Image (spheres, rainbow, N blue to C red):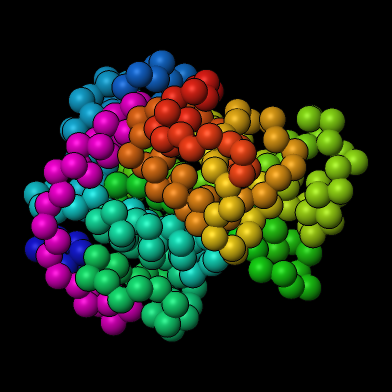
């Protein structure tokens, strides 16, 4: 029985999911982009779990890498590509879950409020809910991500009287999730971040958006530090930095630029979710930081082509 077929008191009952060769092939290709990565520095290799380090250093085949990373236990049968979504009940995370399910992925939705998740997320046999709080440490997250093929992090702090909330969620929380992935052998990580996180280096210290966002506990600084940790981790990452987020349907086509390029503009959360999901299927998205907004006059280009045009970090 696949892991999606199991259920507990904290999950939706599910059933076995038929194999989807196209997703397996595309994800294997995307995850396997790591084989084009130069050998890791020995210090990074030593910091990785042994199985993950072997995948990087010996450049195993893409399909073998995905199977090894996604197997929840020796001899377990893999039936579909499974993605863990952190922040699954948020306004962006919810859309990521919906788009993954629409494309036939299995989804493990991490949430701090199971009741809220049951009421806001789709009722789908490919969806499993788990309790997961990124602020509680990496060890508490390992079992939540064990056996998945990839992780999408769409978390964000909720405004409160706690001045350290942005750091607890957007910095330490993301770091905890990355470390949980390393311990569980998950080798693909998508982060939804923000433009202007590196505003100081871009000469945007006086940009009103940079000032306002950092008034809330230095939110952008916290996100930037989390990004730096991901880039040092050895995990195959894609960092997506959207402009100002709107809850409205898209009003333009996606514009994608390299890191530290965009300092204004907005984009629909629907399009952000689309980019995050497509990154899982595009080998061209590996080891890249991209910034996205939408413009009515922008050409409508396939996301794979847009990712390919961005230089790898």
Q: Is residue 284 above or below residue 16?
A: above
Query: Which residue occupies the foreground of this view, 220 or 173?
Result: 220
1 relative to 214 in the view: left or right = left
Question: Residue at the front extreme?
Answer: 297
Write the residue at 41% across / 16% down.
Answer: 38
Q: Is residue 254 above or below residue 37?
A: below
* Quarter of the image where the N terminus is located: bottom left
x%, y% of residue 8? 25, 77
Please identify the quarter of the rendering in which residue 286 is found.
top left
Question: Residue at the top extreme?
Answer: 38
Write the residue at 78% across / 30% down.
Answer: 202
Based on the picture, tell me whether residue 32 belongs to the magenta stretch.
yes
Residue 241 visible? The answer is: no
Q: Is residue 116 above or below residue 107?
A: below
x%, y% of residue 222? 70, 48
x%, y% of residue 200? 81, 35
- Highlighted range, magenta: 7-34
Based on the picture, tell me whether residue 223 belongs to the magenta stretch.
no
Question: Residue at the right extreme?
Answer: 206
x%, y% of residue 42? 44, 20
206 relative to 266 in the view: left or right = right
106 relative to 47 in the view: left or right = left
Q: How many marks?
A: 0
């Amino acid at each position: 029985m696949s892991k999606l077929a199991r259920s507990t008191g904290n999950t939706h009952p599910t059933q076995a999911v038929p194999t989807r060769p196209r997703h397996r092939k595309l994800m294997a290709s995307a995850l396997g982009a790591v084989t084009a990565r130069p050998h890791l520095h020995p210090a990074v290799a030593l910091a990785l779990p042994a199985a993950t380090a072997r995948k990087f250093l010996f450049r195993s085949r893409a399909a073998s890498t995905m199977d090894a990373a996604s197997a929840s236990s020796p001899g377990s049968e893999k039936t579909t590509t499974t993605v863990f979504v952190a922040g699954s009940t948020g306004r962006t995370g919810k859309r990521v879950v919906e788009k993954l399910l629409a494309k036939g992925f299995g989804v493990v939705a991490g949430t701090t409020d199971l009741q809220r998740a049951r009421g806001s997320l789709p009722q789908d046999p490919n969806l499993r809910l788990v309790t997961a709080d990124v602020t509680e440490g990496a060890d508490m997250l390992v079992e939540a991500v064990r056996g998945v093929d990839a992780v999408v992090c769409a978390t964000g702090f909720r405004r409160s009287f706690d001045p350290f909330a942005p750091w607890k969620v957007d910095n330490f929380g993301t770091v905890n999730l990355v470390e949980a992935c390393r311990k569980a052998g998950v080798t693909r990580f998508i982060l939804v971040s923000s433009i202007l996180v590196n505003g100081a280096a871009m000469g945007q210290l006086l940009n009103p958006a940079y000032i306002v966002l950092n008034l809330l506990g230095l939110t952008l600084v916290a996100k930037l530090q989390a990004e730096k940790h991901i880039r040092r981790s050895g995990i195959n990452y894609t960092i997506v930095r959207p402009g100002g987020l709107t809850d409205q349907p898209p009003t333009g086509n996606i514009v994608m630029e390299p890191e530290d390029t965009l300092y204004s503009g907005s984009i629909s959360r629907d399009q952000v979710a689309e980019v995050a999901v497509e990154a899982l299927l595009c080998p061209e998205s590996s080891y890249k930081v991209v910034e996205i907004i939408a413009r009515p006059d922008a050409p409508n280009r396939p996301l794979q082509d847009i990712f390919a045009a961005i230089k790898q970090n």
